[in-house]
Amino acid sequence: MKKGKQGEMSFLQHLEELRWHIIRSAMAIMFFAILAFIYDKIIFDYILIAPKNPSFFTNRVFAHLAELLHSPSIRINDKPFQIININMSGQFQADMWISLIAGFILAFPFVIWEFWRFIAPALHSKERQNARGAVLAISGLFFTGVLFGYYLIVPLSIHFLGTYSVSDQILNQINLSSYFSTIASIALASGLIFELPAVAYFLAKIDIINTSFLKKYRRHAIIIILIVAAIITPPDVFSQTLVAIPLYLLYEISILIVAVVQRNRKKEAKAAEESQE
């Protein structure tokens, strides 16, 4: 139980404190959402619409690789498609949702910090010391995942889904809500997937997983990673490999992190036994 000024806090006091942490987090999200809404032209023109254009960084890299490897099939998004709006309030709704998502992404470190402030008093001093830098690490992993999704998975997905055709008689004119939701879901999903090492750390701390478990199911994890890479990328080995390798490295990093947690736990247990003797 957390301790307040008058001693241990009651359950209702815990709920009240949690409520204020949530309120402050929501206020931070709304602040950045309003900021994103004000500068929506920058977000839409230079961030969201950019990945479908040939001038986008990733598309230029793939075009360069296509020339070096003499493989035109590697080119992506060299023929940008048209985004259309068919709803009267479509653009306004898209602006609102994208602003909220941008607000959540930008406020993510503050949200994690707020929840850390809520759980930190319940930890022992040594546990707080060991978890020092957790907010920075979790935020760093999240932003790395978002950037990975935006600069790699998004252009590949846009190219595949935007050019996929079941008949030459059907013209692809992508609705803006479908386009923006695809980008937002990929970026957020990538950010959450990159939290795997942090999740593995906390699960290992409470003794739910260990290295034996992760090594035992490594083959299953590889299959899942390959399936995910195949779903979110064009049907070519090159693109799937580009996505699968970082995801697999995250899994291996998680095993190393869990091993460190187990080693530290053994040292603490040994030190406790020696102190009792």
Image (tube, rainbow, N blue to C red):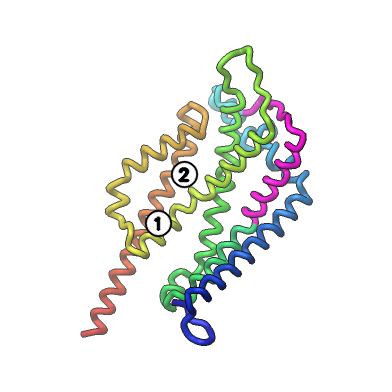
* Residue 6 coordinates in the image, percent (x, y): 52, 87
Extreme residue in the bottom direction: 6
* Residue 240 coordinates in the image, percent (x, y): 47, 33
Which residue is depicted at the point 57% across and 47% down?
A: 188
Q: Is there CB contact under 8 Å for labels 2 and 1?
A: no
Residue 54 part of the magenta segment:
no
Relative to residue 217, is residue 235 drawn left or right?
Answer: right
Relative to residue 157, is residue 123 drawn left or right?
Answer: left
Residue 101 part of the magenta segment:
yes
Which residue is depicted at the point 45% across and 58% down?
A: 198
Three-letter amino acid code at the position of disc 2: Pro
Q: Look at the image and give the residue range highlighted in magenta.
A: 77-106
Q: Nearer the viewer, residue 119 or 69?
A: 119
Q: Quadrant of the N terminus?
A: bottom left
Q: Secondary structure at mark 2?
A: helix
Q: Quadrant of the C terminus?
A: bottom left
Residue at image mark 2: 246
* Residue 213 coordinates in the image, percent (x, y): 29, 52
Q: Quadrant of residue 79?
A: top right
The mark that comes first in sequence, 2 or 1, is 1
Q: Nearer the viewer, mark 2 or mark 1?
A: 1
Q: Is residue 194 visible?
A: yes
Gap in angstroms between the C-alphas marked 2 and 1:
16 Å
Residue 125 in the image: above or below residue 45: below
Residue 206 in the image: above or below residue 10: above
Residue 43 in the image: above or below residue 126: above
> Label 1: few (<14), some or many (≥20) within 10 Å?
many
Which residue is depicted at the point 64% across and 28% down?
A: 77
Relative to residue 235, is residue 223 drawn left or right?
Answer: left
Residue at image mark 1: 200
